[in-house]
Amino acid sequence: MASKRLMSLASGLLGASMLLTACGADTPTQTPVPPAATVPPTVMPTNAPMVAAPTNTTAMAAATATTAMVAPTNTAATAGGVMTPTVMAPAATATVSGSGVMAPAGSFSWRAYAEPETFDPALMQENLSIDIGQNFYDSLVEFNPDTQAIQPALAASLPTVSADGTVYTFKLRKDIKFSNGDPLTSADVVYSWNRVLNNPKAPYVFVMDDIKGATDVEASAVSTDTTKTKVTAASGIEAPDPYTVKVTLNNPSAYFLSESTVWTYFVVNQKVAGADSSFTETGKHLGAGTGAYVLKEWKHQQQILLERNPNYWGSEKPSVDVAVRILPETATAQAQYEANQLDALDGPSPADLKRIQGDAKLKDQLHSVGQARSVWIGLNVQHAPFGPKDDAKAMKLRQAVAQAIDREQLVELALSGAAQPLTTLLPKGEPGYKEYTAYKFDPDAAKKALADAGYPGGQGLSLTYTYRQRDAEQRVAEQLQSQLKENLDLTNDQIKIQAVDWKIMLNARQAHKYDMFYGSWGHDYPDPQNWLSANFQSKYIDKGNDPGYNDPKFDQLTSQADKLADPAKVADRMALYNQAEKALLDSATIIPLYQTTRYWLVNPKWSGYNTNNSFVFPFRRVKLAK
Amino acid sequence: MFAYVIRRVLAMIPSLLGIALITFSLMHIPKAGPFSSEHANPVVTARLEAAYGLDQPLWPAFYGAATGLGQGATLVLAGLAVAGSVLLRRRRDNPVLLLVANLLVTGGALLGALFALMLFQGPATRLGGSGFAPGQFLRFVSNILHGDLGTSFSQVDRSVTSIILDSAGNSFVLGLTAFLVLVGLAMPLGIVAAVRQNTWVDYAASAFSLIGYSIPNFVLGIVLILVTGLWLRLIPIAHWGDPIDLILPAFVLAIRPMAVLTRLTRASMLEVLNQDYIRTAWSKGLGARAVLLRHGLRNAMLPVVTVMGDQLGDLVTGSLVVESLFNVPGIGHFFVQSVGQLDYGMIMGTTLFYAALVLVINLVVDLLYGVIDPRVRLGAGARA
């Protein structure tokens, strides 16, 4: 009996001590410090020289509506909190480098939150593949990551355009070699682009649809009709001599230059890259691209080694090799980073940010940038209760919801401050962004509007907010529900929330099944056309215009702006888009909430690592800090 | 015995087919596809689905002008088969005819089910012309018979087989290590706890079991990573490639099954040790080792082996949580991720892989019964 008591006591003590270690060791409380050394988002001058609207709206609108950057299915990174909310690391960590060699000594280690899908330019579509893959290849022109202006890359200069705007002539640089020493010629460019057209699995092939003959090749690639001869080359892509590429478009499309920076246009070596993706496996990538790095090894689910290209043509030569570690579990990656076994951690857990910002050593290593992604609440304006759009009572209800939301509190409580409140569709840093608030937070006005809408005190109201099943979105939904209840005097029955699996939600949302839903957009390239026209013109009501927004004035303004190609009239073009956005926001069809922020930690022994609102900067810029 | 093994192996085939059928049906219930995305354009989605063969009807179907004729013929054949079977059964004396009758009724039932499926599925509108399309499921089955599980949609252009083989190997190594830790620690502990019942050893084992069962493995894992990796810098964090990397994840994986197995071994041993024949063995003067192991443990093993087999199956197929935490490149996360992404090839591949493994382990466990307890006769003479 005595030993039984002793046993219970011992177990009790053991349990208590474990509880204490779990709850204790809190970081000393501090006032929330904003992330130090915030890199200001790249400010887009409104007279962006390269942004030019297409003259051919139908082809362009179809193409731009479909240019897609699949948002990272970042379940682990943002939901790092699934495992544990905070990493309980002590403030004082030894500066001794971690035990065990992780990667080739002297290389820069970077964390990837998932296994990249592919490094075949024809098949790439997700941000992670592009963040890494952009280091292997180049296209004829590219966006300067600092200024976001278009500059020549493989081309010696920007192309000459024919008078009618349909023929673009690129002159290639003559000194470019692939990573195995093979010289680059125009034949490789023609091969690369036709390679994409001939691949029926290429998800982004439509960015080439403006080129003459492209759609014929695409159709021939999927056709099972054995009687017709196969068309394997687009007539609009020609190589009159080894250093000239001539592109003929179907219609004058001043948009083409922006499109040709998309990764689908990356040039590969026809002697190395065959029709399938096997050249992206370990040991087979040498010579496939012209980029600063070569894919040396791809140990699936573990790491990817990038080796410097000795034949790199650019002036910014890479100085270190890169080891990309695939670390889906954020807490593990954080521990590795703090043990100095990882050089750059892209995407620390939002729940961990307060601790990092309070940590004397870590707070200077944390950086952030506002991403080109905004999040909003979408309201179905096709039928009651939030529609028809022009019905006065429905308008009042939308207004009531808009005025009942406190964005600052939402971001602070639901996202731990890891986002920026936003009142427009376009996020800060995007060309065409203009500060504008349609409906300020005003609970009294909101209650009055609710009464005017026919629901005094919430009587008779029954709303459900549908959101995407993910940690961050769940916290936001819960916070929204609590705000609406408090500011509009509603009960739990009157405003409910429901989570739906993302893919199922996408389909159902497109079919207009929800009244009040989570909406979000991240751009494919920096232009307001990609935000406004592609998502809210009435012709896309069943093809992505999920609220069912139908406004002839909006359609007219955006179409006009889409066609305004004259580079001297950029300010006018932006003004048109601003008017259209104002109309959209005034109707409260969407209620913008916040703009996402991308955080990263980088060890101060490195300089040059950076991220803009879309991608990580090319790794060739990373070097040891002096 | 040999015949028993052969029969069991053959019986796996319809099991796997049934599992494939159920998984395939469940997989296609959500109204979404692997290519649904935020920026999805109906034209592009249709093209991708065509490229991967997802625009074909799910089940076998007649389409176009042949629809009525084909479906009618199916129904008629089904009816004829069943009728023929009924007639043949009259001749009960002839075993060959009985076999044929069985085959006929099976065939007839299948055809009838096929007919019902065709009606339920509706017309195959996306196909031009007329004819018979085997449908996605039959195409999948025939591909499997050629060893091709398809390609993954998320790991673009990589075959499902290569993904599974790559990652399953790592999960297997980790799982096996965890299993050895499990058996090596749990069984002795359970035996000792039973022998020294109601002493401090017994209570310690019970406490250990309770703690091991209660602590969530991700909490334990994170604490261990922090302590050994970050604070003490003993073990590289989230590294895979050296034997030392196996220790922590194997321990974390094993701790809960260890708790269960300890308790079970203890309980089973206690039951056996109270039997008369054990008392006889002691009084005969046999040593502790003979009594406890040869007589005691061997009799106690049956339930323990069953549970161990189940645990082995779970351990070697990877654990999502532990593998994510320790960054083990295993197969665990594919089970969850492939469903979320509606990666059809991976879902079928991982499910069938796991099912096949479980079936094999079950067979081994059943065979072990015969080894452990000679009274158990498997096969023709079995009564159990």
Image (cartoon, helix red, strand yellow):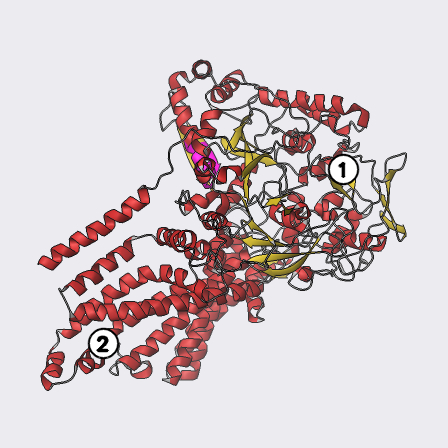
Q: Which residues are magenta?
A: A465-478
Q: Residues within 10 Å of mark 2 (few under 14, many from 20)?
A: many
Q: Residue at x 44, y 32 (%)?
A: A414
| Image quarter of residue B224 | bottom left
Tell me residue A612's x, y (percent).
63, 37
Q: Amino acid at mark 1?
A: Ile
- Is A560 part of what is drawn in magenta? no
| Mark 1 to mark 2 CA distance (whole Å) | 77 Å
Chain of residue at mark 1: A
Which numbered disc covers residue A150? 1
Tell me residue B174's x, y (percent).
43, 65
Q: Amino acid at mark 2?
A: Leu
Which numbered disc covers residue B297? 2
Say which of B262 and A104 sits in front.
A104
Tell me residue B274's x, y (percent).
12, 73
Against A588, residue B348 (above or below) is below
Against B61, residue B194 (above or below) is below
| Image quarter of residue A603 | top right
Which numbered disc covers residue A558? none
